[in-house]
Amino acid sequence: MFETNTAETKTAIIIGGGVAGPVAGLALRKAGIEATVYEAYPSTTGGIGGTLAIAPNGIAALRVVGADEAVIAISSPVTRSVMSVGRKRFELPGLADVPPLRLVHRNDLHRTLHDLAVAGGVQFEYGKRLVDAEETPDGITARFADGSTATADVLIGADGVRSTVRTLIDPKAAGPNFTGLLGFEAVARHDVGVEPGTMTFTFGNGGFYLYMPNPGGGTRWGINLPQDRPISLAEARAVPSTEWMKTLLARYADDHPARELLLASSADELQVVGSMHIMPPVEHWHRGRMVLVGDSAHAPSNSSGQGASLAIESAVQIARCLRDLPDIPSAFAAFEQLRRGRVEKVAARAARINQAKAPGPIAKALMPILMPLLTRIAMNPEKVAGPEQRYVIDWEAPVSGRRYAPKN
């Protein structure tokens, strides 16, 4: 499985076992670098998080490490997208010759990537909450809350929006920004009467929601509830699900099919996804032997449909850079140069979408008039989605210290 690796890096500590961590482990192994993932949770995630999207570029990046088929097998394709405003529905144009977006539950994705990484020789250690790291001329030592340590050539922070590694790199680094939305999802025992694979994005009186026929029957829906302040996932889940259902029903009492979907859903099966966040631009992606990948460096809001895919891309790209460049500083610099512009452009687009998810009265009145124009101009698929979804990493191409552009 190992490729020849003549660069300085031979071993890596990866902090975080979510999406980017296992993919980085597989990519590093492919590049000839031994990798161990250290996860703060006591085991693989169980029921944490909701449904997420893997875009075609994310699937392409997974193909590099041999994980694309396994993820496709546990996901559902979105073959058609529709926007609904009031009584008007607009077909959203898609990209030609591009595979569909895939929907997958975060927990299923975590388990699948973990199992593939283990099968590929990546080691995992659980119950390892990072508290500090100490660099020496020859390596870096991670210190965990249980008193244990680990040493390697580099330390990769794949530990999410509340990254400990980010604060070790820069104690003044900003944390995630709240988008003003709280996420919920469930499967309703109700048929919305649209063809399988159709995702409907709806601007209702109560706010933004989406729904799609569930492959197992019924309709899977998600709601972004406007919220004045962010609350932790633990705080959100401490509220009885029956109370959240009452709140949602009151807000969407006059929205169809939102009301029908809520009434046909069980409160016991309501998934509270939690407050939705977006990372502001992170000033320092790396320092010394530490570097950030995935959400710890760049977390666009869920509106982008690209969060997981960008994390997967970055996990593959850091391995290429460490494989090809002779020293760690030049590898990290090349990695940031490859990634920063792309991920910040996606984040900016997602931020603009968030502003429209809870429109005021004037915007609501104008939306039926403006939407056809938006679908023709602002939502031109090649202009908006083409550069994002057609992005393909050329694993075989060497990374140089000068600016390098991957194949689109």
Image (cartoon, grey):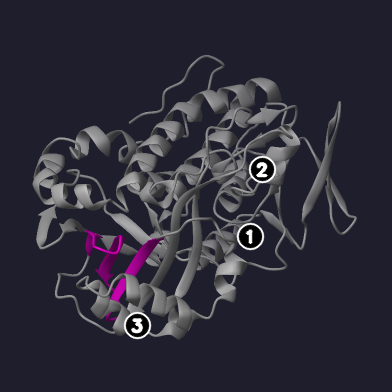
The magenta span reads 198-225
Q: Amino acid at mark 3?
A: Ser
Task: Report, in whole angstroms, how far the alpha carbon at label 3 lies from the one at label 1.
Answer: 37 Å
Name the one closer to the observer, 247 or 238.
247
Distance of label 2 from label 3 (alpha carbons) = 38 Å
- Asked which secondary structure carries label 3, the reply is loop
Q: Which residue of the protein is positioned furthest toward the top in this rendering?
A: 402
Q: Is 283 situated left or right of 287 in this image?
A: left
Q: Earlier in the sequence, mark 2 or mark 3?
A: 2
Q: Residue at x 33, y 77 (%)?
A: 249
Q: Is residue 206 magenta?
A: yes
Q: Earlier in the sequence, mark 3 or mark 1?
A: 1
Do the numbered discs 2 and 1 sit on residues whose CB atoms are within 8 Å? no
Number of marks in picture:
3
**Callout 2, which amino acid?**
Gly
- Element class at badge 2: strand
Q: Which residue is mark 3?
A: 265
Q: Mark 2 or mark 3, which is nearer to you?
A: 3
Q: Which residue is mark 2?
A: 157
| Residue furthest out toward the right | 147
In front here: 7 or 3? Answer: 7
Look at label 1 and name its amino acid: Val
Q: CA distance from mark 2 to mark 1?
A: 19 Å
Q: Say whether residue 180 is left or right of residue 287.
A: left
Mark nearer the N terminus (2 vs 1): 1
SS label for mark 1: helix
Is residue 385 magenta-colored? no
Q: Which mark is residue 221?
A: none
Q: Residues within 10 Å of mark 1 (few under 14, many from 20)?
A: some
